[in-house]
Image (tube, grey):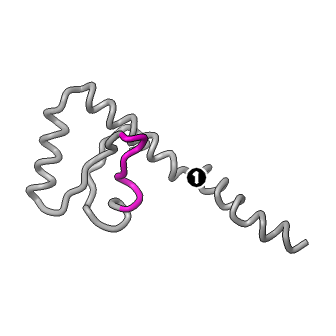
């Protein structure tokens, strides 16, 4: 996703709840559970106009930025700051 690839992920747990979610109202990828759904997603991506692929890829890239190392570091600092600063 971070490189602009459109994900086709299993329709369960993490991908369904955290990763392949709309970003600013734009689809970021596809979820599938069986061979037919995976094949459908691949064909849909291959057949869609390039402009639509680019919209999805751009949204996927924005979505992936939520999982960057810097974002983790910043969020962790924000979460533990009250604990550390409050105990002094």
Residue 53, percent from left and from top: 27, 32
Q: Secondary structure at mark 1?
A: helix
Q: Of 71 and 24, which appears nearest the observer?
A: 24
Q: Quadrant of residue 60?
A: top left
Q: Quadrant of residue 5?
A: top left
Q: Of 68 and 11, which appears nearest the observer?
A: 11
Quarter holding the N terminus? Answer: top left
Q: Is residue 64 left or right of residue 53?
A: right
Which residue, given by chain and number where applicable, does mark 1 sit on?
69
Q: Is residue 33 left or right of residue 22?
A: left
Q: Tell me which residue sits at (34%, 44%) in the image.
A: 28
User: Up-down: is 2 above or below 17?
Assistant: above
Residue closest to the far left: 36
Q: Is residue 19 magenta?
A: yes
Residue segment shown in magenta = 17-25
Residue 31, percent from left and from top: 24, 55
Residue closest to the far front: 25
Q: Tell me which residue sits at (37%, 46%) in the image.
A: 22
Q: Tell me which residue sits at (43%, 43%) in the image.
A: 2
Majority SS type along the magenta span: loop
Q: Tell me which residue sits at (19%, 38%) in the image.
A: 45
Quarter holding the C terminus? Answer: bottom right
């Amino acid at each position: 996703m971070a490189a602009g690839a459109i994900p086709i992920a299993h329709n369960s747990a993490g991908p369904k709840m955290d990763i392949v979610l709309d970003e600013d109202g734009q689809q970021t990828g596809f979820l599938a559970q069986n061979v037919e759904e995976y094949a459908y997603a691949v064909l849909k991506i291959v057949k869609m106009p390039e402009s639509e692929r680019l919209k999805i890829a751009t949204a996927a890239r924005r979505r992936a930025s939520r999982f960057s190392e810097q974002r983790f570091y910043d969020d962790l600092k924000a979460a533990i700051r009250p604990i550390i600063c409050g105990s002094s």
